[in-house]
Amino acid sequence: MRKRLGFSFSALFLGSIFGCGRVSTLTDVHADGSLTRTIKFHGQAPDEKNGVSIGPKLEDTFIIPSGAPWKVTRAKEKDELIVTATRDVPKGETLKQDLVIRGKIKGNPGRLVVNELAVRQVAPGRLEYREVLHYQGDRPKEMDQAAPELTSILKSTLPANLAAEAEQSDLTRNLIREIWRTLFGPGDPLISQLMMHPDLAERRLKMRLAAAVDKTLQQKFGNRMTLEQRQAVTRKLVATAAAKTSTMGKDKSKAGPPEPGGNDDGGLQAIFISVRLPGKVVATNGERDESTGEVFWALYSLAPALEDVVLTATCETGK
């Protein structure tokens, strides 16, 4: 059996991805700045004979909006239960915690992942959609534990006149952020692909990390480093980062139930967020679907565990 990067994450997340809930949102922004919000929660439908679900109930995974002004419907499609919540949001109102993933915080049930959404006019004829996902559990310790070793590698591989600058945390912080985003999104998260096609996922992981490291080195050191020097540092850092990522997966896959008073990541929930804007999109950190005119982001619930995930899209109305 494979014991490479892909395998370790397969062991960790196979049980989490399959059989757990997922959530998708669509925000229709209107020209006056008001919006219509639609959230769909997907989960395993109970067995028709005995009413028992294979996986956790949707209500155990998410806090589903209820009561006015929300309109909530429930439907079954094959073996899937879909709960849809829709409401209109007036111009200028901030929508808080309509997307909530449950989990344990310090051993107590709570709102592990929460959101906040607002649409505002940033200039005449220009609207900005901004949604923030916030993780309320403990910051993941695995990536922080890797920082000292990454710093050590920088010090040993950078040119002598630059080695002292390796102590500055922005270099390792950027690399750690890129590892987390590559695995959990937003963007094209590789964590599920690591299970299905580990060789391809591992190659893409290393390619993305290499591009991030090279860009960071260029921004920090400019022409003080040659291309050959950047490549040498990048190769060493990427190899170490991939090994650390594999170790993290193996450790977690062997771990038992959370200790009393500890943090629980609440499983790995898939999140798909999209927005439809009333004009030409002029700036966004999401992906654009030209066929539908929507901007979208794909991620997993652990994505904001390292730092807040901020999703933005700006349009010019009437264009």
Image (cartoon, helix red, strand yellow):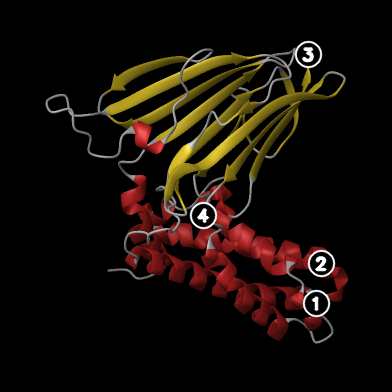
Q: Mark 2 or mark 3, which is nearer the start of the sequence?
A: 2
**Residues tagged 1 and 3 counted as in contact (Cβ below 8 A):** no
Instruction: In the rendered view, tell whether residue 157 sits above or below residue 58.
Output: below
Between marks 3 and 4, how big is the CA–CA gap?
A: 38 Å
Q: Which residue is mark 3?
A: 318
Between marks 1 and 4, how big is the CA–CA gap?
A: 28 Å
Label 4: few (<14), some or many (≥20) within 10 Å? many
Q: Quadrant of the N terminus?
A: bottom left
Task: Report the front residue among 52 and 167.
Answer: 52
Q: Quadrant of residue 317?
A: top right
Q: Could you tell me the amino acid type at mark 1?
A: Glu
**Residues tagged 1 and 2 counted as in contact (Cβ below 8 A):** yes
Q: Residue at x 27, y 40 (%)?
A: 55
Label number found at residue 220: 2
Q: Quadrant of residue 146?
A: bottom right
Instruction: In the rendered view, tell whether residue 90 sits above or below residue 305.
Output: above
In percent of width and height, residue 161 lies at 84, 84
Question: Is 215 left, or right, of 72 in this rendering?
Answer: right
Q: Mark 4 or mark 1, which is nearer the start of the sequence?
A: 1
Q: Which residue is mark 1?
A: 165
Q: Residue at x 38, y 68 (%)?
A: 250
Q: Which residue is mark 4?
A: 183
In percent of width and height, residue 215 lies at 74, 62
In percent of width and height, residue 57 lies at 31, 34
